[in-house]
Amino acid sequence: MSEKTIYNFCAGPAALPKPAIEQAQKELLSYKGIGMSVMEISHRSKWADEIIGEAEDNIRTLLNVPDNYHVLFLQGGASLQFSMIPMNFLQGTGKPADYIHTGSWANKAIAEAKKEGEVSIVWNGKDENFVRTPAQSELKLDPNAAYVHFTSNETIQGVEYFEEPETGNVPLMCDASSDFLSRPIPVEKYGLIYAGAQKNIGPAGVTAVIIRDDLLERVPEGLPSLLDYKNMADNKSLYNTPPMFAIYMVMLTTRWVRNDIGGLKAMETVNRKKADLLYEAIDNSNGFYRGHAKPECRSRMNVTWRLPSEDLEKQFIAEAEQEGFLQLKGHRSVGGLRASIYNAMPVEGCEALRGFMAEFQKKNA
Amino acid sequence: MSEKTIYNFCAGPAALPKPAIEQAQKELLSYKGIGMSVMEISHRSKWADEIIGEAEDNIRTLLNVPDNYHVLFLQGGASLQFSMIPMNFLQGTGKPADYIHTGSWANKAIAEAKKEGEVSIVWNGKDENFVRTPAQSELKLDPNAAYVHFTSNETIQGVEYFEEPETGNVPLMCDASSDFLSRPIPVEKYGLIYAGAQKNIGPAGVTAVIIRDDLLERVPEGLPSLLDYKNMADNKSLYNTPPMFAIYMVMLTTRWVRNDIGGLKAMETVNRKKADLLYEAIDNSNGFYRGHAKPECRSRMNVTWRLPSEDLEKQFIAEAEQEGFLQLKGHRSVGGLRASIYNAMPVEGCEALRGFMAEFQKKNA
């Protein structure tokens, strides 16, 4: 057994709040003393209602979700949402869908949408190597588009949106997988927000979807039942057996944000502090560390940076691992280092990594 | 905390082997002492490889899966397979697909297939109230069909197949959700076998799919990536983040069948014994208990039966619950009682229920 403190900087699946896992461990064999595990209860039971109900209530309360929005728990990750959105809202409309191309995840959403209908790339960050999000004035939006899609945080490039694109009456769809519940957002600006759980709100295997009422009326007939937002909303996520244990972990994780952290404003303060610690270390390194993203678009969830050489990067990763700083290797498409510091990463993790960065620089600059 | 022994007869999600949950509990905070939970590790890590690898190997070994078959772990339950099969193998072929209609789950598979192409119902048990599976001679199979689909066990009616339909060169597709790994089956007779995990092999949130190599060549271009069997097979279930924790529970559950039970022949012996205990209680009750299914088609997974009146059925369920026999209420479409006795139900559970049934009859006949 490892005795030293471990900090898990994995981009996802990522660290979960320790109190959430501890609670799950305590009652893994007998949920609330009923003699059955959460994994063993019927999804039609009162216990399942309670779990799904609290998970939904936590999300509603944390984000101040208006009453005309549904909160759903689906399967298939963000990747299935990439297809569900155009299947439900693009195909057959005769309209194009506007996609903002900010990096690797936007690219995947675009590829799936193109299979279902006409896609218009209204801004493309590729020529600049995806170092920033666009200004509103740069977006070539079509007022007749079926919807506008954007990716609020690009985990691979480490680029984050801090203000929603303005889309007028065109519904705004957002892949918020990697910064969902990391800070308050104005839900009323969105038509649909989706988030694979495995960054900020739970384990892999469940996707949170917040969808505005009126969009459900646009869902065409004849979609596969499991890919039909209206069917899933009408059945309150219980059309088929939902991934109960993953939803239970979402319940525990959102309870932690709500009660232990004190809500999304407090969560944002913590997340800002963590990100600042690392970006300051980069900025104060006299060029030894070089951040990938433009300062004003720097992600508070995924800090990406390079060292003077690939050899030094390898050495950094190896030595960091020895010290308990795990999974810091950047994605191969960007290279370098990446520290993913989602909600569950404690401030001490970033302080410790910052200390390690300073030490490493001193020895190797 | 409850002190008495609990027997969970839920139709699914269902009881899991206690040693599997205990192992998960022990290492929930730190898998193999690495300082991270299974829920927190990257799906690109060696630990994830190890877990997915063992889960696959256990299934391959238990079922003696030939080398020309892939074993996949997907999301969306059997319900998404209802759509994926016709999306991959029916639409665009110009052929019909043959469906055998044995009950509620076959019906759902048929409804989704009809959205994607032409469906031919080659046998329909509805007029007999779904009390049996068909004989081979009753099937009106089309030698040019895209495939034949059947449901090996109907959980709601309690009707099970014990011999596969013969389909010649037409690929045989099977929803084996509720009797998967409950006994040996000749995999080489199948084109595709799928099973939502939450009955016999794990928690809700993962679906095992066994698919023959040559079928992958039939997958059309342009399907949503997550619904494309070829894409999922080419990426060995790692196209996107898989539901790691659910797969880990499949690993532990199949390890239990393999090592603790001793394989599928031994599992079948246990399952037969359990079912016999309950069916004998029904048959020896002088008509107080009446089984739903025809004796030769009685499911070994879901025992369904009626009492002389609905009032007595309610009373039975209430008194049984007091004694720790949980979730015995039959599905509303069939009524009466249902005891789901999947792999993880111990023989003692069925012995105890049989005892309760005898007592109840003595008091109320």
Image: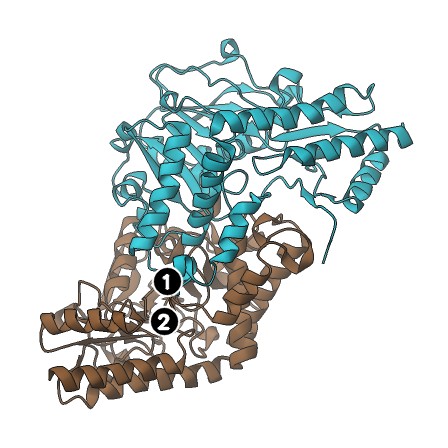
Chain colours: A brown, B cyan
Closest to the observer, B364 or A140: B364
Q: Amino acid type of disc 1?
A: Ile
Q: Nearer the viewer, residue A361 or A298?
A: A361
Image height check: is A165 above or below B80? below
Compared to residue A19, the image places residue A86 above or below, namely: above
**Residue A198 in view (yes/no):** yes
Amino acid on which the number 2 mark rests in the picture = Ile
> In the image, residue A53 lies at what x, y percent?
61, 62
Q: Quarter of the image holding residue B335? A: top right
Q: Chain of mark 2?
A: A
- Front residue of B112/A293: it is A293
Asked if residue B155 is positioned above or below residue A174 in the image, the reply reads: above
Numbered disc 2: secondary structure: loop
Q: Quadrant of the C terminus of chain B?
A: top right
Q: Residue visible at 27% across and 80% down?
A: A298
- Category of crowding for the residue at label 2, using alpha-carbon neighbours closer than 10 angstroms: few (below 14), some (14–19), many (at least 20): some
Asked whether the beta carbons under mark 2 and mark 1 sit within 8 Å of each other, the answer is yes
Q: Which residue is mark 1?
A: B34
Residue hosting label 2: A6
